[in-house]
Image: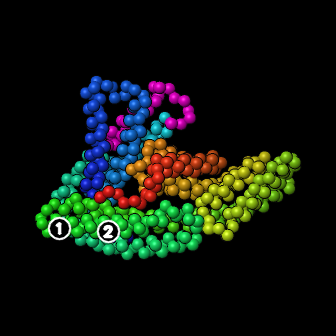
Amino acid sequence: MLNGLWWLPSLLVFGTAALAVILGARALRSRQRTRGIDPVSTRAALEQSAGVELVRVDDLLSAAEDEVEFARAQFGDRAAVGLASAVQSGREQLREAFHLHQQLHDAVPDSDSQRRRWSERIVELCGAISQGLTTEMTQLDGRRSIERSAPEQLSELERGIAATRAEVAEAEATLDRLSETYAPATYSRVESAPAHATESLSAAQSALAIARQKLAAREPAAEALDSAAQELRAARHAIESVSRTASGLDSSSAELATVVAQTRRAVSDAAAQRDAATLPESADEISRALDVATATIALVTDRRQLPDPLARLDELRDAVSRLDAALATARSQQQRIDNAREALRGALFSARSHLDVASGFIEDNRGRVGADARTRLAEAERQLALANAADDPVEALDTARRVSRLAQDADALARYDAGPRTAPLKRSAG
């Protein structure tokens, strides 16, 4: 960490994001009034507008969340209370909007009036979020314009760049360890992170040189300082993505060892139930599932290839699911509940892991990911909350597995939206 040095104000970045949302919405309403067109006159246009507003407001909320940290670092916790409250309220409203958007795109038929009402509600929620955030961010920007000190920022950025540059070697060492431990596909997304960080740090250094020149000439240097701060944040994000990836892989690897042991116990128990089964067809069904589970254990513990622990977890859980189905006719309801409770922890881990992967990719490629991927991500988060709150472990287990599928769908849609430029750590334009 850099003792908060990179939490520098970015009026240019976040002010522009807020202004774009506000002016875009106002321009749309103005054009509609000028033409005499009802803003919700056509259902298709309204649904399209709702999706656009969801993306815009989601991006604005992310910018505002960062702005809360900037305000706390610069002015103290009290100054950020208003914006933090607006962000929290906005996230609650956005969850409702994403849920409505999910209903618009699920397989359940809806009436025209329902679809129109839901779309209108999405637009209404997005407008309320934008207004609340803009009010708070404008107040902070006014204070920042008065209290900001360009020479002090320049010194802090110089220290931040030096400290971050020292961490590039640590990230490279971490990647070397990953290359010896895990399959290349598991860390390929962050393999170029040190290079991206170095590139961003060089750009930040160049921006600081421009800022020094402007300060020496007594010219405004805010734009150059904002550019340097943005590049420093990009470098920090690149470095931190390596440690996040390593932590996730190490956790998945440890979880895999635990699940292998659990599955072996389940296989032993299933073999005993097969031998005690009174119906030949039940015994045959259990035997087939046991063969699959045994083969899967051998596959996921094979050390001849570097593993993808999350993929191996999925394969193992599929085999366990088949074994559970085969045992359903041969075990009591209490046994089924006990086994579901044991499997739930692992299913929730996989669900959270898939959710983290999808969330991380969408966050890294936020400018290129549309509403459908974000909606599935929001639905997966909602379903995860239901799984955590469920009293019935069987129901919770099914919900957790549904979360994994939704998160995988969100990840696939996000990667499709991002197209061939899927390097999330690519430096943003200064």
**Front-most of residues 73 and 149:** 149
First in sequence, mark 2 or 1: give its number: 2
**Residue 385, x across and y down, in percent:** 52, 49
On-image quarter of the N terminus = bottom left
Q: Is residue 36 above or below residue 257?
A: above
Question: In terms of image quadrants, where is residue 22?
Answer: top left
Residue under circle 2? 202
Quadrant of the frame with the C terminus: bottom left
Residue 287 falls in image quadrant: bottom right
x%, y% of residue 389?
Answer: 55, 49
Question: In the shown orientation, is residue 72 left or right of residue 277?
Answer: left
Q: Is residue 275 magenta?
A: no
Determine which residue is flagged by label 1.
213
User: What's the magenta region?
Assistant: 105-130
Residue 239 visible in rendering: no
Residue at image x 68%, y 63%?
300
Q: Amino acid at mark 1?
A: Gln
**Residue 99 placement (x, y as % from top left):** 47, 40
The residue positioned 30% from the left and 38% from the top of the image is 25
Looking at the picture, how far across and down is residue 246, in whole percent? Answer: 51, 67
Q: Is residue 94 visible?
A: yes
- Magenta region, mostly helix, strand or loop? helix
Q: Residues within 10 Å of mark 2 (few under 14, many from 20)?
A: some
Residue sitting farthest toward the front: 420
Query: Left or right: 288 with respect to 23?
Result: right
With 85 as the anchor, is 377 left or right in this view? Answer: right
Q: Specify whether residue 116 is painted magenta.
A: yes
Q: Residue at x 49, y 35 (%)?
A: 104
